[in-house]
Amino acid sequence: MVTVVVIINILISLLLFYIAWQIWRLKRRIAFITDRLTFYEKCSQTLLSQTPQNLDISQQNLHNLRLNNQSLQFKIQQVRQIVNLLLLGQRLGKRYVRQSNFFWFRKTLTKTGMNNSNISS
């Protein structure tokens, strides 16, 4: 009878020792996870603490880029207008040269025609 009680006590002790060992392992895992989460929180806190300053800098840079873009758009518009004026001048110049050449050609034809008729007579 005493043997049975001692065996039962040993079995209960082994079971409780196994449970204590599992709890100790679980405690180590939880401590490891807690340390990791604390580390991640510190890292994210460091990054997020700089966020307002970074946002302000980014907004200022964006504002400067928009102003620069507006001035560049204005310059592009001016260059387009200049190119359009040059093209218009080129077209008008070609038309004027073509017309003046036509009149010059007619005058030379009539003069040479008159000279040829004078020569043949």
Image (spheres, rainbow, N blue to C red):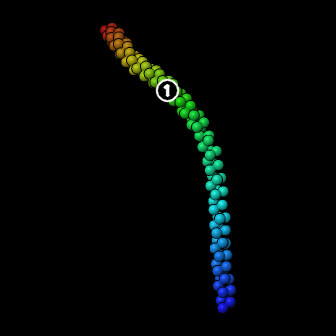
Mark 1, residue position: 70
Residue at disc 1, secondary structure:
helix
State the residue in front, 121 or 61: 61
Residue 32: image x %, image y %?
Answer: 66, 60
Q: Is residue 114 above or below residue 40?
A: above
Residue 72: image x %, image y %?
Answer: 51, 26
Residue at image point 62% right, 40% down: 50
Residue at image point 51% right, 30% down: 66
Residue type pointed to by label 1: Gln
Q: Is residue 4 above or below residue 43?
A: below
State the residue in front, 11 or 1: 1
> In the shown orientation, is residue 70 left or right of residue 105?
right
> In the shown orientation, is residue 44 left or right of residue 109?
right
Residue at image point 35% right, 13% down: 103
Quadrant of res 17: bottom right
Residue 63: image x %, image y %?
Answer: 53, 30
Residue 53: image x %, image y %?
Answer: 60, 36
Report crowding for label 1: few under 14, some 14 to 19, many 20 or more residues within 10 A (C-alpha). Answer: few
State the residue in front, 94 or 101: 94
Locate the C terminus by quadrant: top left
State the residue in front, 40 or 64: 40
- Counting the numbered discs, the total is 1
> In the shown orientation, is residue 87 left or right of residue 37?
left
The answer, for residue 120, to whether it is visible in the render is no
Q: Residue furthest front?
A: 1
Locate the N terminus by quadrant: bottom right
